[in-house]
């Protein structure tokens, strides 16, 4: 026990200094873990933002330029199909006439078009139409006395 008595006792300043060093070392270790977790969260947030932007791109309507480009592509494909069909039929067969929905509708006679169904002018509270009601009894002239 005499050996323990011979060791110099640290001063209060040394004890405070040692405690501060230990606190900084412990905090530095935790900061590394916190920094890694913050990086993971930032990566997850960036990934979610990328997915959200992709979803918005898919949901947005087509622009006028995109529609024009698609129309041009459809016309080109129609011409290619017509050329392939004429090649299959042989050189003596005429190429099929191209019709569009607008031109087909214009060729229909006016009599073939159906008029829109007419609706009754007034609606009753019960929801019944006038045709479903019983006709009123004819009015009689007043009786003379």
Image (spheres, helix red, strand yellow):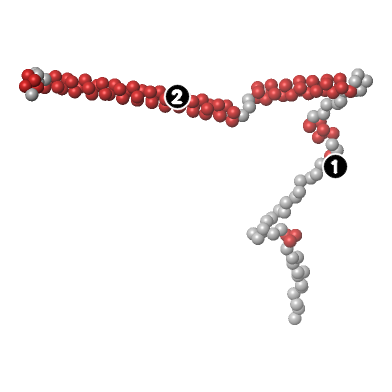
Question: In the rendering, at what x and y percent does residue 7 appear?
Answer: 9, 19
Q: Which residue is nearer to you in this view: 137 or 86?
A: 86
Q: Which residue is mark 1?
A: 111
Q: First in sequence: mark 1 or mark 2?
A: 2
Residue 11 visible, this orientation = no
Q: How many marks are shown on the rendered structure?
A: 2
Q: Can you say which quadrant of the picture contains the C terminus?
A: bottom right
Q: Residue at x 14, y 22 (%)?
A: 15
Residue 32 visible, this orientation = yes
- Residue 130 picture quarter: bottom right
Q: Residue at x 79, y 20 (%)?
A: 80
Q: Residues within 10 Å of mark 2 (few under 14, many from 20)?
A: few
Question: In the rendering, at what x and y percent does residue 68 appear?
Answer: 69, 23
Q: Which residue is mark 2?
A: 43
Q: Which residue is nearer to you in this view: 29 or 34?
A: 29
Q: Can you say which quadrant of the picture contains the N terminus?
A: top left
- Residue 139 picture quarter: bottom right
């Amino acid at each position: 026990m005499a050996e323990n008595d011979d060791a110099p006792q640290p001063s209060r300043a040394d004890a405070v200094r040692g405690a501060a060093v230990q606190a900084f070392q412990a905090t530095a270790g935790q900061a590394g873990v916190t920094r890694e977790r913050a990086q993971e969260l930032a990566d997850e947030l960036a990934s979610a933002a990328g997915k959200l932007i992709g979803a918005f791109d898919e949901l947005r309507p087509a622009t006028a330029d995109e529609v024009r480009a698609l129309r041009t592509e459809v016309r080109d494909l129609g011409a290619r199909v017509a050329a392939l069909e004429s090649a299959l039929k042989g050189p003596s067969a005429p190429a099929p006439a191209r019709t569009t929905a607008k031109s087909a509708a214009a060729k229909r006679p006016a009599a073939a078009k159906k008029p829109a169904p007419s609706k009754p002018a007034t609606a009753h509270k019960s929801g019944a139409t006038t045709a479903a009601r019983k006709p009123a009894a004819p009015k009689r002239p007043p009786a003379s006395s």
